[in-house]
Image (cartoon, helix red, strand yellow):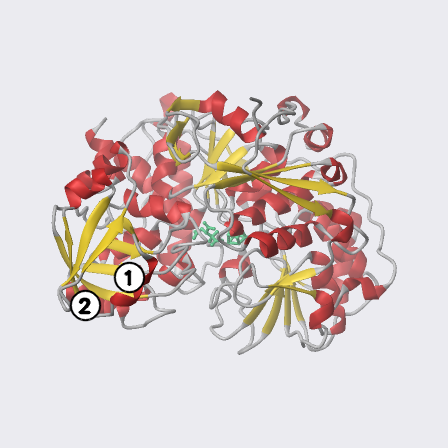
Amino acid sequence: MGLTIAQKIIKEHLVEGEMVAGKEIALRIDQTLTQDATGTMAYLEFEAIGIPRVRTKLSVAYIDHNTLQSGFENADDHRYIQSVAKKYGIRFSRPGNGICHQVHLERFGVPGMTLIGSDSHTPTGGGIGMLAMGAGGLDVAVAMGGGAYYITMPKMIKVNLTGALRPWVSAKDVSLELLKILSVKGGVGYIVEWGGEGIKTLSVPERATITNMGTELGATTSIFPSDEITEKFLIAQGRGDAYRPLSSDSDAVYDRVIDINLSEVEPLLACPHSPDNIKSARELSDVKVNQVCIGSCTNSSLRDMLRVAAILKGKKIDDSVSLSVSPGSRQVLTMLSECGALSDMIEAGARILECACGPCIGMGFSPNSAGVSLRTFNRNFEGRSGTRDAQVYLVSPEVAAASALTGYITDPRTLGDYPEIEMPEKFKVNDSAVLLPAEENEAKSLEVLRGPNIKPFPDANPVTDEIAAKLTLKVGDNITTDHIMPAGAKILPYRSNIPYLSKFCFAVCDEQFSERAKEAGSTIIVGGSNYGQGSSREHAALVPLYLGVRAVVAKSFARIHAANLINAGILPLTFENAEDYDRLAQDDALTLIGVFEGMRSGKMSLKNERTGEIIPVTCSFTDRQIAILTAGGLLPYTRNSK
Ligand code: MIC
Ligand code: SF4
């Protein structure tokens, strides 16, 4: 039986386990990346593991999220990460050099290699045929130390593309089309592999938009073949030697095949507040727009920016619209400036922001109250923009630019001819903003610079055979990590200060939660399906740990968050019968019974002390995960097993 592309890469990197869907496998990791919002914690964890030098082929620390320095905290974290990187053998991408995924694709990604990143959009690297996955910071720290990365062997979805995109339709619309088909949980447990004749019409940045957005399906990752288009991109980046062809075998077997005819895709939008709430631009033409934001790791490539500039050239944005443009990298920004496209955008009325995540994670540029904001980003979860009642729509650069001109949601096809853009043969390469680590000898004597905002990790709380806890919060389906541990300009600077962060835990759902949990001392949270979708932030597990959360009982979990809970020593458990969800209410006193035996057998009992009912809950932990939970988390487990 032939292999898919992902299976080939997995086979080459397998260090433990069998390649059978649903079974745990361990992978050797070639490259890691971190960004600053998760990086400070990841490097504190790396230091706590106590390995003198990274053991990967390449590790890069990016500063791209917390670039709004409205106090000392972010700058202190940048300095901490820079000093850790220099000492331990990690490259340091300075603030302003760009968004981690965009820069990594341009400068470091290698087809056929494995990459994990402490950011859920790491699958962007799948655009050049990498097996690139988002992970919790601690998993990345372990991989930097040479440890394997453990995942459940995924099933495979093939998306077969035919035809070619019509003018004004772009890769973003293809991602939105797949979200319409699969929903935000349809990819859980799968790798999405893209193939068919249609892929030959898509450039690397377009492919990367698609693999980036695959995160929103809940997929483990998404991947394109590495072909002559990949080679062309790498040559244009001056990295032709990184090229290696990669394709699936003709008899590879997929668990599901989805056909999309690119010629039939039309301009789409994801409506508030979920990336799978899809409508066509045609249907929404009477919606007035207040703000348009172009950028983020999804749509900030040179191709996207040139397209936007060409649409705006010689025109003026509508008086009622505020438009921001954040190019994805310094390379993109420099090239835009040299060819005059930057001026075209500025003259049309765009506000140019730095090459960073910016508005995508609520780092400035929040919309007006109840404002309608069109964003070329990948997430439109409630409150994420920093304005609680904002109405955020996810769109392509084409829809964004067209709507900025008219002031209404606009099907860009109504603008007439699709302006031509010319992609350069060669990108402008200047890696001076990526600082190299010190040589090993010099590194030993280097000091790591810590600011006062770095506070100790929460204490480990190893599982016990019986856990008595209060149900302090019951939430519904598709709870995101932005609900559990919100981000944004006011909170993000405190990512290394768990006690401070804890005040905001679940604040979007219930402002009293944090106090209630602290008072209860020991907590169980009850959730619906796809609990923990979205970000890789391990803070969505570490903060609950700090607040005394011992277990989360839900209908189902998102992959990275479930792993983060285990890494923090918190039990992710599922209802055996989904309807038992209704038999539990906030403030119920609960007891988990038979935990030790249950972790092995896959079944334990949850007693509701109020009603006396026994609710069966299930789990499927590997021996390694049981050992982690018993040790009180991955950090004590890794330290003990060194
Ligand atoms: C996001 O897009 O939600 C983030 C911010 O990039 C997160 C990481 C984080 O919370 O720091 C992600 O996607 O993993
Ligand atoms: Fe940054 Fe937004 Fe991409 Fe997350 S999704 S890495 S916040 S640009």
The picture quadrant where one finds residue 281 is: bottom right
User: Label 1, on which residue?
Assistant: 580
Q: If the image is split into quadrants, where does the C terminus sit?
A: top left
SS for dot 1: helix
Image side of residue 149 versus residue 11, left or right = left
Q: Nearer the viewer, residue 246 or 400?
A: 246
Where is residue 550? Give x, y as percent: 21, 53
Where is residue 500? Give x, y as percent: 28, 61
Is residue 192 something that shows in the picture?
yes
Task: Give, as a three-letter code, the residue at label 1.
Answer: Asp
Asked if 421 appears above or below 390 in the picture, the reply is: above
Residue at x 40%, y 25% (from the top left corner):
18
Where is residue 269? Give x, y as percent: 65, 62
Residue at x 66%, y 52% (from the top left corner):
172
Asked if 597 appears above or below 530 in the picture, the reply is: above
Where is residue 58? Give x, y as percent: 48, 28
Which is in the foreground here, disc 2 or disc 1? 1
Q: If the image is split into quadrants, where does the N terminus sit?
A: top right
